[in-house]
Protein backbone atom coordinates (compact mmCIF):
# COMPACT_ATOMS: atom_id res chain seq x y z
CA UNK A 1 0.00 0.00 0.00
CA UNK A 2 1.58 3.24 -1.21
CA UNK A 3 -1.26 5.69 -1.84
CA UNK A 4 -4.53 5.94 0.16
CA UNK A 5 -6.46 5.93 -3.12
CA UNK A 6 -5.59 2.25 -3.44
CA UNK A 7 -8.09 1.70 -0.60
CA UNK A 8 -10.82 3.36 -2.65
CA UNK A 9 -9.83 1.50 -5.82
CA UNK A 10 -10.08 -1.81 -3.95
CA UNK A 11 -13.45 -0.97 -2.33
CA UNK A 12 -14.86 0.33 -5.61
CA UNK A 13 -13.83 -2.91 -7.38
CA UNK A 14 -15.13 -5.14 -4.59
CA UNK A 15 -18.33 -3.24 -3.72
CA UNK A 16 -19.05 -0.94 -6.68
CA UNK A 17 -22.74 -0.35 -5.98
CA UNK A 18 -22.60 -0.21 -2.19
CA UNK A 19 -23.25 3.24 -0.72
CA UNK A 20 -19.98 4.83 0.39
CA UNK A 21 -21.13 8.29 1.39
CA UNK A 22 -24.45 9.74 2.41
CA UNK A 23 -25.52 13.16 3.59
CA UNK A 24 -29.26 13.54 4.04
CA UNK A 25 -30.84 12.30 0.80
CA UNK A 26 -27.62 12.59 -1.23
CA UNK A 27 -25.71 9.31 -1.67
CA UNK A 28 -22.70 8.13 -3.66
CA UNK A 29 -21.70 4.52 -4.30
CA UNK A 30 -18.03 3.53 -4.17
CA UNK A 31 -17.93 3.34 -7.98
CA UNK A 32 -19.55 6.79 -8.31
CA UNK A 33 -17.18 8.24 -5.73
CA UNK A 34 -14.15 6.94 -7.62
CA UNK A 35 -15.49 8.04 -10.99
CA UNK A 36 -16.50 11.56 -9.98
CA UNK A 37 -13.29 12.21 -8.01
CA UNK A 38 -11.06 10.93 -10.81
CA UNK A 39 -12.95 13.05 -13.35
CA UNK A 40 -12.84 16.20 -11.23
CA UNK A 41 -9.09 15.58 -10.92
CA UNK A 42 -8.96 15.88 -14.70
CA UNK A 43 -10.03 19.53 -14.40
CA UNK A 44 -7.09 20.37 -12.11
CA UNK A 45 -4.11 21.71 -14.11
CA UNK A 46 -1.84 18.76 -14.93
CA UNK A 47 1.34 20.74 -14.23
CA UNK A 48 0.53 20.73 -10.49
CA UNK A 49 2.27 17.94 -8.64
CA UNK A 50 2.50 17.39 -4.89
CA UNK A 51 1.01 20.89 -4.57
CA UNK A 52 -1.66 22.13 -2.14
CA UNK A 53 -5.25 22.14 -3.41
CA UNK A 54 -7.58 23.91 -1.00
CA UNK A 55 -11.08 22.57 -0.40
CA UNK A 56 -13.95 24.63 0.99
CA UNK A 57 -14.91 21.84 3.35
CA UNK A 58 -18.57 22.35 4.14
CA UNK A 59 -20.67 19.56 5.59
CA UNK A 60 -21.52 17.70 2.42
CA UNK A 61 -20.66 14.50 0.55
CA UNK A 62 -19.14 16.65 -2.20
CA UNK A 63 -16.40 17.79 0.19
CA UNK A 64 -15.16 14.19 0.29
CA UNK A 65 -15.22 14.07 -3.52
CA UNK A 66 -13.11 17.24 -3.62
CA UNK A 67 -10.56 15.72 -1.21
CA UNK A 68 -10.28 12.64 -3.41
CA UNK A 69 -10.06 14.72 -6.60
CA UNK A 70 -7.07 16.59 -5.17
CA UNK A 71 -5.43 13.22 -4.49
CA UNK A 72 -6.25 11.74 -7.91
CA UNK A 73 -4.60 14.81 -9.47
CA UNK A 74 -1.35 13.88 -7.68
CA UNK A 75 -1.64 16.71 -5.16
CA UNK A 76 -2.71 17.06 -1.53
CA UNK A 77 -5.73 18.76 -0.03
CA UNK A 78 -6.01 21.59 2.47
CA UNK A 79 -9.48 21.78 4.08
CA UNK A 80 -10.78 25.27 4.85
CA UNK A 81 -13.81 25.88 7.03
CA UNK A 82 -15.99 28.14 4.85
CA UNK A 83 -17.63 29.57 7.99
CA UNK A 84 -14.46 30.65 9.75
CA UNK A 85 -13.77 34.40 9.91
CA UNK A 86 -12.61 35.90 6.61
CA UNK A 87 -9.25 36.97 8.04
CA UNK A 88 -8.49 33.38 8.99
CA UNK A 89 -9.55 32.04 5.59
CA UNK A 90 -7.29 34.65 4.01
CA UNK A 91 -4.38 33.70 6.29
CA UNK A 92 -4.67 30.06 5.19
CA UNK A 93 -4.89 31.00 1.51
CA UNK A 94 -1.85 33.25 1.91
CA UNK A 95 0.16 30.60 3.72
CA UNK A 96 -0.74 27.55 1.60
CA UNK A 97 -0.96 29.58 -1.66
CA UNK A 98 -3.01 26.97 -3.54
CA UNK A 99 -3.39 27.41 -7.31
CA UNK A 100 -6.80 25.74 -7.14
CA UNK A 101 -9.68 25.77 -4.66
CA UNK A 102 -12.32 23.06 -4.88
CA UNK A 103 -15.77 23.10 -3.33
CA UNK A 104 -19.49 23.10 -3.88
CA UNK A 105 -21.04 26.01 -5.73
CA UNK A 106 -22.88 26.79 -2.48
CA UNK A 107 -19.54 27.34 -0.71
CA UNK A 108 -18.06 29.64 -3.38
CA UNK A 109 -19.07 32.78 -1.48
CA UNK A 110 -16.42 31.88 1.14
CA UNK A 111 -13.89 33.30 -1.35
CA UNK A 112 -15.75 36.60 -1.80
CA UNK A 113 -13.60 39.57 -0.90
CA UNK A 114 -10.48 37.44 -0.42
CA UNK A 115 -7.20 37.67 -2.34
CA UNK A 116 -7.09 34.47 -4.38
CA UNK A 117 -5.68 34.63 -7.89
CA UNK A 118 -6.22 30.92 -8.67
CA UNK A 119 -9.14 28.90 -10.05
CA UNK A 120 -12.25 27.74 -8.22
CA UNK A 121 -13.64 24.41 -9.43
CA UNK A 122 -16.76 22.52 -8.41
CA UNK A 123 -17.75 18.88 -9.08
CA UNK A 124 -19.75 20.27 -12.02
CA UNK A 125 -16.40 21.07 -13.69
CA UNK A 126 -15.44 17.36 -13.76
CA UNK A 127 -13.75 16.27 -16.98
CA UNK A 128 -15.38 13.69 -19.28
CA UNK A 129 -12.77 11.01 -18.59
CA UNK A 130 -11.25 9.96 -15.26
CA UNK A 131 -7.52 10.36 -14.66
CA UNK A 132 -5.49 7.24 -13.80
CA UNK A 133 -4.24 6.52 -10.28
CA UNK A 134 -1.26 8.85 -9.67
CA UNK A 135 2.19 7.42 -8.94
CA UNK A 136 2.80 9.55 -5.84
CA UNK A 137 2.30 8.23 -2.29
CA UNK A 138 4.50 7.05 0.57
CA UNK A 139 6.13 10.12 2.10
CA UNK A 140 4.41 12.48 -0.32
CA UNK A 141 1.94 14.84 1.36
CA UNK A 142 -1.67 13.69 1.71
CA UNK A 143 -3.35 16.58 3.47
CA UNK A 144 -2.63 19.64 5.56
CA UNK A 145 -4.83 20.84 8.40
CA UNK A 146 -4.50 24.24 10.01
CA UNK A 147 -4.63 24.48 13.78
CA UNK A 148 -4.73 27.38 16.17
CA UNK A 149 -1.39 29.20 16.49
CA UNK A 150 -0.31 31.23 19.52
CA UNK A 151 0.69 34.19 17.34
CA UNK A 152 -2.85 34.37 15.98
CA UNK A 153 -1.64 32.96 12.66
CA UNK A 154 -2.99 29.46 11.92
CA UNK A 155 -0.27 26.83 11.53
CA UNK A 156 -0.39 24.09 8.91
CA UNK A 157 0.46 20.49 9.81
CA UNK A 158 1.35 18.36 6.80
CA UNK A 159 0.73 14.60 6.82
CA UNK A 160 1.77 11.92 4.36
CA UNK A 161 0.13 8.94 2.68
CA UNK A 162 2.48 6.63 4.60
CA UNK A 163 1.43 8.17 7.94
CA UNK A 164 -2.29 7.71 7.26
CA UNK A 165 -1.78 4.16 5.97
CA UNK A 166 0.29 3.27 9.05
CA UNK A 167 -2.49 4.55 11.32
CA UNK A 168 -5.33 2.96 9.40
CA UNK A 169 -3.77 -0.49 9.33
CA UNK A 170 -3.14 -0.34 13.10
CA UNK A 171 -6.64 1.07 13.80
CA UNK A 172 -8.39 -1.67 11.81
CA UNK A 173 -6.18 -4.33 13.37
CA UNK A 174 -7.16 -3.13 16.88
CA UNK A 175 -10.90 -2.88 16.23
CA UNK A 176 -11.70 -5.28 13.35
CA UNK A 177 -13.90 -2.87 11.38
CA UNK A 178 -15.55 -4.17 8.21
CA UNK A 179 -17.99 -3.14 5.49
CA UNK A 180 -21.07 -3.77 7.68
CA UNK A 181 -20.22 -0.68 9.69
CA UNK A 182 -22.36 2.45 9.24
CA UNK A 183 -20.29 5.35 10.53
CA UNK A 184 -22.22 8.31 11.95
CA UNK A 185 -19.89 11.21 11.23
CA UNK A 186 -20.03 14.16 13.64
CA UNK A 187 -16.63 15.85 13.27
CA UNK A 188 -16.50 18.47 10.49
CA UNK A 189 -14.32 17.66 7.47
CA UNK A 190 -12.03 20.64 8.09
CA UNK A 191 -11.26 19.08 11.46
CA UNK A 192 -8.43 16.56 11.68
CA UNK A 193 -10.50 14.00 13.61
CA UNK A 194 -12.83 13.53 10.60
CA UNK A 195 -10.02 11.86 8.64
CA UNK A 196 -10.45 8.73 10.79
CA UNK A 197 -14.07 8.31 9.65
CA UNK A 198 -13.28 9.17 6.04
CA UNK A 199 -10.37 6.78 5.54
CA UNK A 200 -12.12 4.03 7.49
CA UNK A 201 -14.89 4.18 4.90
CA UNK A 202 -12.40 4.01 2.01
CA UNK A 203 -10.46 1.08 3.46
CA UNK A 204 -13.25 -1.14 4.77
CA UNK A 205 -16.12 -0.45 2.39
CA UNK A 206 -18.24 0.83 5.31
CA UNK A 207 -20.85 3.53 4.78
CA UNK A 208 -20.10 7.05 5.99
CA UNK A 209 -23.28 8.88 7.01
CA UNK A 210 -22.56 12.59 7.38
CA UNK A 211 -25.05 13.67 10.03
CA UNK A 212 -26.51 17.10 9.17
CA UNK A 213 -25.39 19.80 11.63
CA UNK A 214 -28.90 20.83 12.64
CA UNK A 215 -29.58 17.32 13.97
CA UNK A 216 -27.10 18.01 16.77
CA UNK A 217 -29.17 20.91 18.10
CA UNK A 218 -31.89 18.57 19.38
CA UNK A 219 -30.60 15.32 20.91
CA UNK A 220 -33.92 13.49 20.57
CA UNK A 221 -34.01 14.33 16.86
CA UNK A 222 -30.37 13.23 16.63
CA UNK A 223 -31.01 9.81 18.19
CA UNK A 224 -34.05 9.27 15.97
CA UNK A 225 -31.80 10.05 13.00
CA UNK A 226 -29.19 7.50 14.17
CA UNK A 227 -31.96 4.90 14.32
CA UNK A 228 -33.40 5.87 10.94
CA UNK A 229 -29.96 5.53 9.31
CA UNK A 230 -29.14 2.37 11.33
CA UNK A 231 -25.82 3.82 12.43
CA UNK A 232 -23.52 1.33 14.16
CA UNK A 233 -20.41 3.34 15.01
CA UNK A 234 -19.84 6.79 16.48
CA UNK A 235 -16.46 8.46 16.85
CA UNK A 236 -17.45 11.84 18.27
CA UNK A 237 -16.00 14.60 20.39
CA UNK A 238 -17.09 14.16 24.04
CA UNK A 239 -19.07 17.41 23.94
CA UNK A 240 -21.48 15.96 21.38
CA UNK A 241 -21.98 12.83 23.50
CA UNK A 242 -22.32 14.91 26.67
CA UNK A 243 -25.16 16.99 25.24
CA UNK A 244 -27.22 13.85 24.67
CA UNK A 245 -26.66 12.92 28.32
CA UNK A 246 -27.24 16.44 29.69
CA UNK A 247 -30.71 16.58 28.18
CA UNK A 248 -31.62 13.09 29.49
CA UNK A 249 -32.46 11.96 25.98
CA UNK A 250 -32.49 8.20 26.61
CA UNK A 251 -35.55 8.36 28.85
CA UNK A 252 -37.40 9.31 25.65
CA UNK A 253 -35.51 7.56 22.83
CA UNK A 254 -32.42 5.31 22.69
CA UNK A 255 -30.02 4.42 19.88
CA UNK A 256 -31.02 0.96 18.65
CA UNK A 257 -28.24 0.01 16.26
CA UNK A 258 -25.09 1.63 17.69
CA UNK A 259 -22.52 -1.00 18.74
CA UNK A 260 -19.44 1.10 19.41
CA UNK A 261 -18.91 4.64 20.71
CA UNK A 262 -15.44 6.19 20.53
CA UNK A 263 -14.58 9.64 21.82
CA UNK A 264 -11.64 11.80 20.94
CA UNK A 265 -10.38 15.37 21.03
CA UNK A 266 -10.86 16.27 24.69
CA UNK A 267 -11.44 14.68 28.09
CA UNK A 268 -14.74 12.79 28.30
CA UNK A 269 -16.63 13.85 31.46
CA UNK A 270 -17.17 10.61 33.38
CA UNK A 271 -20.58 11.77 34.60
CA UNK A 272 -21.90 11.83 31.04
CA UNK A 273 -20.21 8.60 30.03
CA UNK A 274 -21.81 6.91 33.03
CA UNK A 275 -25.20 8.09 31.75
CA UNK A 276 -24.52 6.44 28.36
CA UNK A 277 -23.27 3.26 30.04
CA UNK A 278 -26.29 3.07 32.36
CA UNK A 279 -28.83 3.20 29.53
CA UNK A 280 -26.73 1.42 26.89
CA UNK A 281 -24.54 -1.10 28.73
CA UNK A 282 -23.97 -3.36 25.71
CA UNK A 283 -22.15 -0.71 23.67
CA UNK A 284 -18.33 -0.82 23.57
CA UNK A 285 -16.92 2.54 24.70
CA UNK A 286 -13.38 3.53 23.78
CA UNK A 287 -11.41 6.60 24.82
CA UNK A 288 -9.01 7.71 22.06
CA UNK A 289 -6.01 9.97 22.38
CA UNK A 290 -4.15 11.62 19.54
CA UNK A 291 -2.44 14.81 18.43
CA UNK A 292 -2.73 16.96 15.31
CA UNK A 293 0.92 16.12 14.60
CA UNK A 294 0.02 12.48 14.01
CA UNK A 295 -2.32 10.75 11.55
CA UNK A 296 -5.27 9.33 13.47
CA UNK A 297 -4.70 8.53 17.11
CA UNK A 298 -1.94 6.87 19.08
CA UNK A 299 -3.51 5.54 22.31
CA UNK A 300 -6.80 3.92 23.20
CA UNK A 301 -8.59 2.63 26.25
CA UNK A 302 -11.62 0.37 26.19
CA UNK A 303 -13.82 1.33 29.12
CA UNK A 304 -14.35 -1.57 31.48
CA UNK A 305 -15.37 -1.75 35.12
CA UNK A 306 -16.97 0.98 37.15
CA UNK A 307 -15.81 4.59 37.30
CA UNK A 308 -17.26 7.18 39.65
CA UNK A 309 -18.35 10.53 38.22
CA UNK A 310 -15.26 12.30 39.54
CA UNK A 311 -12.75 9.78 38.18
CA UNK A 312 -10.74 10.28 34.97
CA UNK A 313 -10.59 7.76 32.18
CA UNK A 314 -7.13 6.50 31.28
CA UNK A 315 -5.75 7.24 27.80
CA UNK A 316 -4.73 3.58 27.77
CA UNK A 317 -2.02 2.01 25.66
CA UNK A 318 -0.54 2.72 22.25
CA UNK A 319 -1.82 1.38 18.94
CA UNK A 320 0.58 -1.14 17.43
CA UNK A 321 2.14 1.49 15.12
CA UNK A 322 3.08 3.82 18.01
CA UNK A 323 5.54 3.89 20.87
CA UNK A 324 5.06 6.27 23.78
CA UNK A 325 7.57 7.64 26.26
CA UNK A 326 7.00 9.72 29.37
CA UNK A 327 9.90 12.09 29.86
CA UNK A 328 11.03 14.31 32.70
CA UNK A 329 13.39 16.53 30.76
CA UNK A 330 15.65 14.00 29.05
CA UNK A 331 15.00 11.28 31.64
CA UNK A 332 12.55 8.51 30.86
CA UNK A 333 9.85 7.78 33.44
CA UNK A 334 8.63 4.23 33.90
CA UNK A 335 7.28 4.16 37.45
CA UNK A 336 3.52 4.63 38.06
CA UNK A 337 2.18 7.94 39.35
CA UNK A 338 5.06 10.18 38.27
CA UNK A 339 4.06 12.89 35.78
CA UNK A 340 6.07 13.53 32.66
CA UNK A 341 5.68 14.91 29.14
CA UNK A 342 4.39 12.49 26.55
CA UNK A 343 6.65 11.85 23.55
CA UNK A 344 5.52 9.82 20.56
CA UNK A 345 7.43 7.67 18.09
CA UNK A 346 5.47 6.43 15.08
CA UNK A 347 5.50 6.19 11.27
CA UNK A 348 2.19 8.06 11.54
CA UNK A 349 3.90 11.30 12.66
CA UNK A 350 3.30 14.39 10.51
CA UNK A 351 5.91 15.51 8.00
CA UNK A 352 6.30 19.08 9.26
CA UNK A 353 4.78 22.37 10.33
CA UNK A 354 4.34 24.03 6.98
CA UNK A 355 6.78 26.87 6.30
CA UNK A 356 8.14 26.63 9.82
CA UNK A 357 11.38 24.64 9.93
CA UNK A 358 12.27 26.13 13.31
CA UNK A 359 9.12 24.83 15.01
CA UNK A 360 9.39 21.54 13.13
CA UNK A 361 12.95 21.14 14.40
CA UNK A 362 11.93 21.99 17.98
CA UNK A 363 8.93 19.63 18.17
CA UNK A 364 10.00 16.73 15.93
CA UNK A 365 13.38 15.56 17.15
CA UNK A 366 15.70 12.64 16.55
CA UNK A 367 16.37 10.80 19.76
CA UNK A 368 17.82 7.48 20.77
CA UNK A 369 15.64 5.60 23.25
CA UNK A 370 18.01 2.64 23.28
CA UNK A 371 17.62 1.06 19.86
CA UNK A 372 19.03 3.72 17.56
CA UNK A 373 17.92 7.25 16.74
CA UNK A 374 14.24 7.65 15.88
CA UNK A 375 12.06 10.64 15.01
CA UNK A 376 9.82 11.60 17.91
CA UNK A 377 7.23 14.26 18.70
CA UNK A 378 6.96 16.12 22.00
CA UNK A 379 3.22 16.46 22.55
CA UNK A 380 3.21 19.09 25.30
CA UNK A 381 0.73 16.84 27.16
CA UNK A 382 1.57 15.82 30.70
CA UNK A 383 0.58 12.32 31.80
CA UNK A 384 1.49 9.48 34.14
CA UNK A 385 1.21 5.68 34.16
CA UNK A 386 -1.31 4.03 36.45
CA UNK A 387 -0.57 0.75 38.26
CA UNK A 388 -1.82 -1.23 35.22
CA UNK A 389 0.53 0.53 32.79
CA UNK A 390 -2.24 2.68 31.29
CA UNK A 391 -1.46 6.30 30.50
CA UNK A 392 -3.48 8.87 32.43
CA UNK A 393 -3.76 12.46 31.22
CA UNK A 394 -2.66 15.16 33.68
CA UNK A 395 -2.62 18.57 31.95
CA UNK A 396 -1.21 20.60 29.10
CA UNK A 397 2.29 21.91 29.62
CA UNK A 398 1.44 25.24 27.97
CA UNK A 399 -1.61 27.40 27.31
CA UNK A 400 -3.10 25.12 24.73
CA UNK A 401 -6.50 23.63 25.51
CA UNK A 402 -8.92 21.14 24.04
CA UNK A 403 -12.41 22.61 23.86
CA UNK A 404 -15.41 21.18 22.01
CA UNK A 405 -12.99 18.85 20.28
CA UNK A 406 -10.81 21.64 18.93
CA UNK A 407 -7.28 22.35 19.95
CA UNK A 408 -7.07 26.02 20.81
CA UNK A 409 -4.18 28.25 21.76
CA UNK A 410 -5.59 30.66 24.34
CA UNK A 411 -2.95 33.05 23.05
CA UNK A 412 -4.77 33.23 19.72
CA UNK A 413 -7.94 34.46 21.43
CA UNK A 414 -5.88 36.98 23.39
CA UNK A 415 -4.24 38.16 20.17
CA UNK A 416 -7.59 38.72 18.46
CA UNK A 417 -9.21 40.36 21.53
CA UNK A 418 -6.12 42.44 22.21
CA UNK A 419 -6.31 43.80 18.66
CA UNK A 420 -9.72 45.40 19.31
CA UNK A 421 -9.36 49.19 19.68
CA UNK A 422 -11.30 49.16 22.96
CA UNK A 423 -9.02 46.62 24.61
CA UNK A 424 -5.78 47.63 26.28
CA UNK A 425 -4.75 44.21 27.60
CA UNK A 426 -6.45 40.93 28.07
CA UNK A 427 -5.96 37.45 29.34
CA UNK A 428 -7.80 34.28 28.44
CA UNK A 429 -8.31 31.37 30.85
CA UNK A 430 -10.05 28.05 30.55
CA UNK A 431 -12.48 26.77 33.16
CA UNK A 432 -12.03 23.04 32.55
CA UNK A 433 -14.73 22.12 35.09
CA UNK A 434 -17.41 24.06 33.22
CA UNK A 435 -15.77 23.73 29.78
CA UNK A 436 -15.84 27.51 29.40
CA UNK A 437 -13.39 29.94 27.84
CA UNK A 438 -13.26 33.11 29.93
CA UNK A 439 -11.69 36.39 28.82
CA UNK A 440 -10.56 39.17 31.16
CA UNK A 441 -10.14 42.50 29.42
CA UNK A 442 -8.72 45.81 30.56
CA UNK A 443 -10.17 48.60 28.43
CA UNK A 444 -8.07 51.22 26.65
CA UNK A 445 -8.23 54.85 27.81
CA UNK A 446 -10.07 55.86 24.64
CA UNK A 447 -12.75 53.20 25.11
CA UNK A 448 -16.21 54.36 26.14
CA UNK A 449 -18.32 52.46 28.65
CA UNK A 450 -18.49 48.91 27.40
CA UNK A 451 -19.97 45.74 28.86
CA UNK A 452 -18.49 42.27 28.64
CA UNK A 453 -21.38 41.20 26.45
CA UNK A 454 -20.72 44.05 24.00
CA UNK A 455 -17.08 43.06 23.80
CA UNK A 456 -18.09 39.44 23.26
CA UNK A 457 -20.31 40.64 20.43
CA UNK A 458 -17.31 42.36 18.79
CA UNK A 459 -15.37 39.11 18.99
CA UNK A 460 -18.15 37.05 17.42
CA UNK A 461 -17.21 38.05 13.86
CA UNK A 462 -13.48 37.67 14.45
CA UNK A 463 -13.23 34.25 16.11
CA UNK A 464 -14.47 30.81 15.13
CA UNK A 465 -17.58 30.02 17.17
CA UNK A 466 -15.82 27.33 19.22
CA UNK A 467 -13.18 29.89 20.27
CA UNK A 468 -15.62 32.59 21.38
CA UNK A 469 -15.27 33.21 25.14
CA UNK A 470 -18.46 32.17 26.95
CA UNK A 471 -17.88 35.00 29.41
CA UNK A 472 -16.03 38.29 29.07
CA UNK A 473 -15.13 40.16 32.26
CA UNK A 474 -14.16 43.82 32.02
CA UNK A 475 -11.74 44.65 34.80
CA UNK A 476 -10.12 47.94 35.71
CA UNK A 477 -6.58 46.61 35.72
CA UNK A 478 -5.21 43.16 35.03
CA UNK A 479 -3.31 41.90 38.08
CA UNK A 480 0.42 41.43 37.54
CA UNK A 481 2.84 39.13 39.33
CA UNK A 482 6.31 39.99 40.60
CA UNK A 483 7.80 39.49 37.14
CA UNK A 484 5.37 41.98 35.66
CA UNK A 485 3.49 39.22 33.88
CA UNK A 486 -0.29 38.85 34.04
CA UNK A 487 -1.08 37.03 37.26
CA UNK A 488 -3.14 34.14 35.92
CA UNK A 489 -3.69 32.43 39.29
CA UNK A 490 -5.11 35.70 40.68
CA UNK A 491 -7.48 35.97 37.69
CA UNK A 492 -8.50 32.36 38.10
CA UNK A 493 -9.87 33.28 41.54
CA UNK A 494 -12.20 35.77 39.83
CA UNK A 495 -13.68 33.17 37.46
CA UNK B 1 -42.44 37.07 27.18
CA UNK B 2 -40.07 39.94 28.09
CA UNK B 3 -38.17 37.68 30.42
CA UNK B 4 -37.81 35.11 27.64
CA UNK B 5 -36.50 37.80 25.28
CA UNK B 6 -33.98 38.84 27.95
CA UNK B 7 -32.69 35.27 28.15
CA UNK B 8 -32.46 34.95 24.37
CA UNK B 9 -30.64 38.27 24.09
CA UNK B 10 -28.15 37.13 26.69
CA UNK B 11 -27.39 34.04 24.61
CA UNK B 12 -27.14 35.83 21.27
CA UNK B 13 -27.92 39.55 21.07
CA UNK B 14 -27.38 39.66 17.29
CA UNK B 15 -30.78 38.10 16.48
CA UNK B 16 -34.11 39.87 15.95
CA UNK B 17 -36.33 37.61 18.05
CA UNK B 18 -39.49 39.42 17.01
CA UNK B 19 -39.17 38.11 13.46
CA UNK B 20 -36.75 35.18 13.49
CA UNK B 21 -38.60 31.88 13.12
CA UNK B 22 -35.81 29.55 12.01
CA UNK B 23 -33.47 29.49 15.01
CA UNK B 24 -32.79 25.74 14.87
CA UNK B 25 -33.44 24.76 11.25
CA UNK B 26 -31.57 27.87 10.13
CA UNK B 27 -28.59 26.88 12.35
CA UNK B 28 -28.72 30.19 14.26
CA UNK B 29 -28.65 28.17 17.49
CA UNK B 30 -26.38 25.18 17.83
CA UNK B 31 -26.45 22.44 20.44
CA UNK B 32 -24.31 24.48 22.83
CA UNK B 33 -26.72 27.42 22.70
CA UNK B 34 -29.58 24.99 23.29
CA UNK B 35 -27.96 23.56 26.43
CA UNK B 36 -27.48 27.07 27.83
CA UNK B 37 -30.98 28.09 26.80
CA UNK B 38 -32.70 25.07 28.34
CA UNK B 39 -30.81 25.54 31.61
CA UNK B 40 -31.88 29.20 31.74
CA UNK B 41 -35.52 28.47 30.84
CA UNK B 42 -35.77 25.80 33.55
CA UNK B 43 -34.20 28.10 36.16
CA UNK B 44 -36.03 31.30 35.34
CA UNK B 45 -39.49 29.83 34.66
CA UNK B 46 -39.21 27.07 37.24
CA UNK B 47 -40.19 24.36 34.79
CA UNK B 48 -38.82 20.98 33.76
CA UNK B 49 -38.23 20.65 30.01
CA UNK B 50 -38.23 16.89 29.40
CA UNK B 51 -36.81 15.22 26.28
CA UNK B 52 -40.24 14.98 24.66
CA UNK B 53 -40.26 18.78 24.26
CA UNK B 54 -36.90 18.76 22.45
CA UNK B 55 -38.20 19.26 18.94
CA UNK B 56 -36.97 21.83 16.46
CA UNK B 57 -40.46 23.32 16.12
CA UNK B 58 -40.55 24.19 19.84
CA UNK B 59 -37.34 26.24 19.61
CA UNK B 60 -37.43 27.80 16.14
CA UNK B 61 -38.82 31.13 17.39
CA UNK B 62 -39.35 33.08 20.61
CA UNK B 63 -43.08 32.65 20.15
CA UNK B 64 -42.78 28.85 19.81
CA UNK B 65 -40.68 28.74 22.98
CA UNK B 66 -43.21 30.87 24.82
CA UNK B 67 -46.03 28.55 23.73
CA UNK B 68 -44.00 25.55 24.89
CA UNK B 69 -43.37 27.15 28.29
CA UNK B 70 -47.12 27.75 28.69
CA UNK B 71 -47.89 24.16 27.67
CA UNK B 72 -45.36 22.76 30.17
CA UNK B 73 -46.78 24.96 32.93
CA UNK B 74 -50.28 23.73 32.17
CA UNK B 75 -49.10 20.13 32.16
CA UNK B 76 -47.23 20.59 35.46
CA UNK B 77 -50.26 22.21 37.15
CA UNK B 78 -52.50 19.19 36.43
Image (tube, coloured by chain):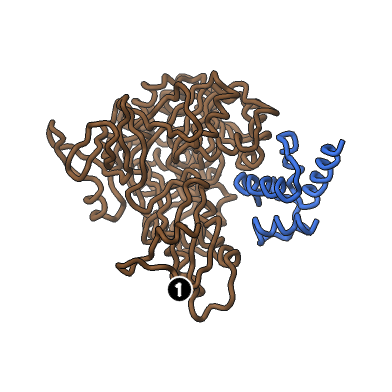
Chain colours: A brown, B blue
Q: Quadrant of the N terminus of chain A?
A: top left
Viewer-nearest residue: A306 or A243? A306
Residue A23 vs residue A416: left or right? Answer: right
Give the secondary structure at mark 1: strand
Residue A70 position, x and y percent, is 42, 43
Residue A375 to residue A300: above or below? below
Q: Residue at x 56, y 63 (%)?
A: A456
A89 sits to left or right of B25:
left
Residue A195 makes an appearance in the image: yes
Q: Residue at x 72, y 48 (%)?
A: B41
Determine the chain carrying the residue at label 1.
A
Residue count near mark 1 (Cα–Cα under 10 Å), binned few <14, some 14–19, many ≥20: some
Does residue A428 sit above or below A183 in this rendering?
below
Query: At 73% across and 60% down in the image, what residue appears?
Result: B16
Percent of width and height locating residue A405: 47, 43
* Residue furthest out toward the bottom: A446
Q: Is residue A36 visible?
A: no
Q: Looking at this view, is A322 or A446 the one in front?
A: A446
Instruction: Name the residue tied to disc 1.
Output: A424
Q: Quadrant of residue B71?
A: top right
Q: Position of residue A97 (x, y in %)?
A: 38, 57
| Residue under the image location 42 percent in, 32 percent down | A313
Task: Locate residue A188, reporting x and y percent.
Answer: 51, 42
Count of marks overlaid on the render: 1
Asked where in the image residue A149 lies, by quadrant, the reply is bottom left
To which quarter of the image does residue A175 belong? top left
In the displayed structure, does residue B78 sit left or right of residue A212?
right
Amino acid sequence: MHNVLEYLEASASRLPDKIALACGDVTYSFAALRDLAARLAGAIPAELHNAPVAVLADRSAETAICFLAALYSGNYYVPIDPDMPAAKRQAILDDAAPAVVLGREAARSALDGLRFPGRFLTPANAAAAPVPLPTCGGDDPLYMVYTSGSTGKPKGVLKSHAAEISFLEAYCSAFAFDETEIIGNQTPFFFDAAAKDFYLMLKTGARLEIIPTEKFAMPTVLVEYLNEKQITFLSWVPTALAIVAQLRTFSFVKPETVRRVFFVGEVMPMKHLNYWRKYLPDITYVNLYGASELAGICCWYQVEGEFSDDESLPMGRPLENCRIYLMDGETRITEPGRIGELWLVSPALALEYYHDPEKTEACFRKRDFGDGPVRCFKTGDLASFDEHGNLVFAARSDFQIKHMGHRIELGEIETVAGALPDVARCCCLYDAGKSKIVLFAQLSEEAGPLTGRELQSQLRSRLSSYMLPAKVHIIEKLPLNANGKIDRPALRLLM
Amino acid sequence: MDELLDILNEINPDVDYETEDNLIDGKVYDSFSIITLIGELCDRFDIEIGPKWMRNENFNSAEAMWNMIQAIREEESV
